[in-house]
Image (tube, helix red, strand yellow):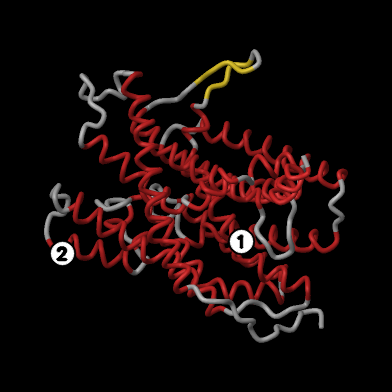
Amino acid sequence: MQQTIARYRDLTELQDGGEIPALHGARALMVFFVAAFHVWQQSWLAPSFNLLGLHINLDSLLRTGYMWVDGMLLLSGFLCYLPHAHARAAGRPSPAAGHFYRRRFFRIVPTYVINLVVVLLMVALPQGRYTDPWAGTRDMLAHLTFTHNLFDFSYLLTPLNGVLWTLAVEVQFYLLFPLLARAFRRMPLMTYAGMTAVAFGFRAYASSLQDSSMWLNQLPAFLDVYANGFVAASVFASLRRRMKEDSWTRILMSVCAFAAVVVLALLVRDQAAEYEVHNVRLGQMARRYTQSVMTALCLLGVSLGLGGIRLLLGNPVTRFLSQISFQFYMWHMVVALQMRHWGIPASSHAYPNQMGDIVWQRSYVLLWFVVTLAISTAITYFIEQPIARRFSGKPRPARRIKEASK
C-alpha cells in the first residue's frame, strides 16, 4: 500500500523545474486529434455510440481536428518560455540561447531530413509526382530551409509531406524566440500587445482576401497563440512559487480546466458547422485567439488540478505517447496516404470510404494506427533520442537580464 501511495505521488506531484506530468497527455491528445482528422479524410469513419443514455457522435471532433495544431503551437510556446518564466520568478538569469538552438536542432532536423528523404525516394520519385528535376529540387530546398510554407509549390502542392508546414512555422518561431523571450521578460505587457496586434492584423488582412490558403498558417498569424503560451508559462511559474498545493486549490484549478473544456467544445461545435472551404478558414482565424486562451487555461488547470486528473494525463502510457508524438505527427499522413495508394487493406470497392464499407474503414484505421505507432516508436528510440542525448549538451546560464521594474 505504501509503495502504491509513493508511486502515485511520484506520478502526480510537481517538482520545481521538473516535468509537468499532465502535459504529456495533453500533447499526445492534441497530436492524435490532428492525426485523426487526416485519417478521417481518408476513411470517412466517424464513430458514434451511446454512453450513459447519451448518444455521442465524434464527427464534429474529427471534422475539426486541424484546430489542434494551434494547441500544439501554444504548448510549444508554453514549454519554450517556461524556463525563462521560472528564472524570472526566482530572479535568476535566463537560459542561454545557444543551448536552446542546439537542443531544437538535434531534436528536429535529423529525423525531419530522414522523413523527407524517405518520402522523396520511396513515394514522390517512384510515383512520378514531379514534372521535371527542377520541381523536385526546389521543393526539397524549400523544405530543407524551412521556408516551404512560403511557396505554393512546397506548401499547397508538395508531393512530399503536407503536414510539415507546421515545422516551418515552428523553426521560424524558434529563430525569433530568444529575442521574443528577452522582450517578454523585460516588457511583458508591451510584448504581448505587440505580438497579439500583429497576429490580429495579419489575420484581418488574410480574411479580406478571396483566397486565404497561403496566409492562414503563416507565423504572424500564430503570434498571439505563442504569446498566450508565454503568459500561461508565466502564470504557472508564479503559481508554483506562491500557491499551496492543497485540495481546495487543486479543486479550483480543476474547475478552471473543466470550464475551458466546455468553451473549447462549443468552439469545436461552431467550427464544425462551417462547410465551405473559405468559411472554414475564416472561422478558424476568427476563433484562434479564444481557442488559444481557453487551451492555455486548460493546460494550467490540468497541470495544477486534482491528482486524479494529473494521473489520467500523466502516466507511463501518456508519457510514452508524448515521447513518440513528434514522429507520429511527421509520419501519420505519409502512412495514411500510401495505404490508400497501395490499396491496403483491400476492398471490393474502388472508393470504399465513399461506399461506407465499414469493415474496410475500421481495418484501415486500425492498421494505420498500428503501422504509424511502430514507425514512430522505432525512430524515436533508435534515432531521435540517441542523437538528442549525444549532441544536446548541458544548458549554461545566460548573462543576467535586468528586470524592467529595477
Q: CA distance from mark 2 to mark 1?
A: 39 Å
Q: What secondary structure is marked by label 2?
A: helix
Give the percent coordinates (x, y) of residue 128.
13, 50
Say which quadrant the C terminus sits in.
bottom right
Residue type at the position of mark 1: Leu
Question: Mark 1, residues whose alpha carbon is within 10 Å: few (<14), some, or many (≥20)?
Answer: some
Is residue 278 shown left or right of residue 267? left
Discs 2/1, front? 1
Residue type at the position of mark 2: Trp
Q: Which residue is mark 2?
A: 134
At x 51%, y 76%, the residue is 393
At x 33%, y 19%, the residue is 359
Q: Which residue is mark 1?
A: 79
The residue positioned farthest toward the bottom in the image shown = 399
Give the percent coordinates (x, y) of residue 122.
19, 51
At x 72%, y 69%, the residue is 86
Give the percent coordinates (x, y) of residue 219.
48, 61
Residue 308 vertical position relative to residue 289 in the rendered view, above or below: above
Say which quadrant the N terminus sits in.
top right
Give the percent coordinates (x, y) of residue 298.
68, 46
Q: What secondary structure is marked by label 1?
A: helix
